[in-house]
Amino acid sequence: MRTILTIQSHVAFGHVGNRAAVFPLERLGFDAIAVNTVQFSNHTGYGAWTGMVLPPDHIADVLKGVEARGAMDGLHAVLSGYMGDATLGDVVLSAVGRAKSGNPGALYCCDPVMGDVGRGFFVRPGIPEFFRERAVPMADIITPNQFELEYLTGHAVTDLASALRATRAARALGPRWVMVTSLTRTDAPDNSIEMLLDGPDGAWLVATPRLELSPLPNGAGDCVAALFLARFLATDGDGATALSHAASAIYAVFQATRDSGQRELQIVAAQDQLVTPGTLYGACRVG
């Protein structure tokens, strides 16, 4: 069985961070080793929460224990997401280096969680700079949203041409694959939402219908990164197939969330469609 180390936030209630990533990884047939960067009661989008950001020494100690079990030698990928503090960066990148030492073919998928359109940055000072200057150059795959892509590259994204310029600039920073988890552009229908993948074999775009969800559920980007990475590994690097699967599966989750009337992503309710989406939205080559 293939194994993925996922270093992200944890909430007791709801589905963000590892709570949005581990279950999809496992449903898609991967053994997920979850290391949590924060322990919160719920995601911060509620405006109030309890819990704490876990200190880097604690996380390093957990990883040391994982390594003592021999688990770092057989990893197929490391997935990182939300970090409570920039000082955790060295711990995360050290784990990536250890994973690649144990398996030179291991991938590092970095979800550079920093902010979003309309909200701006919602992380502590120093984290955006850490992602741009250190994590992204070390990554094989990055999964930014549109806001994060613009920050990383300094390129405003308004249409498909500018989006492709931005993904090319992001790839020039180091990663081989850039998967934009939510793309809104002026030259696309208003009733659709898109994802864009740019890699060594070209660029691919997938569109799904835009659903009315208010408020928008948190954790979708965390879930999408896990879905994409798992399918990418399962297909030996078929980016177009992984993109299509991730978009189709998260659309099914959105549908289940809308139908439930709940704010939290209905990942468990839509679990069968994480594996086999009811509607498959194909990716088309662009650029």
Image (cartoon, rainbow, N blue to C red):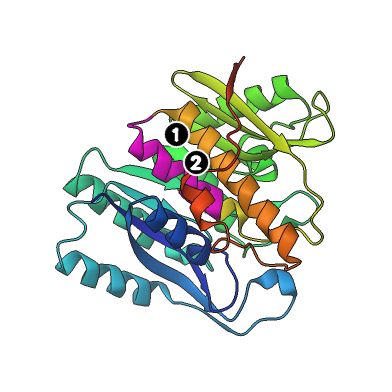
What element does badge 2 sit on? strand
Query: Where does residue 287 sit, x and y in percent of width and height?
Result: 62, 14
Residue 30 is left or right of residue 48, and the answer is left
Query: Where does residue 141 sit, x and y in percent of width and height?
Result: 44, 38
Q: Residue furthest top?
A: 287
How would you rate the neighbour count of disc 1 (Cα within 10 Å): few for under 14, some for 14-19, many for 20 or more? many
Amino acid type for the residue under numbered disc 1: Pro
For the record, the magenta segment spans: 223-237
Amino acid type for the residue under numbered disc 2: Ile
In the displayed structure, 22 sits above or below 184; it is: below
- Is 224 magenta? The answer is yes
| Disc 1 target residue | 175
Q: Quadrant of residue 156?
A: top right
In the displayed structure, 28 sits above or below 123; it is: above
- Is 199 magenta? The answer is no
- Please report the residue visible at 63 percent of the width from the left and 71 percent of the height from the top: 43
How would you rate the neighbour count of disc 2 (Cα within 10 Å): few for under 14, some for 14-19, many for 20 or more? many
The reply to whether residue 162 is in sight is yes
Residue 263 is left or right of residue 111, and the answer is right
Q: Quadrant of residue 137?
A: top left
- Please report the residue visible at 82 percent of the width from the left and 51 percent of the height from the top: 212
| Disc 2 target residue | 142
What element does badge 1 sit on? loop
Residue 133 is left or right of residue 90, and the answer is right
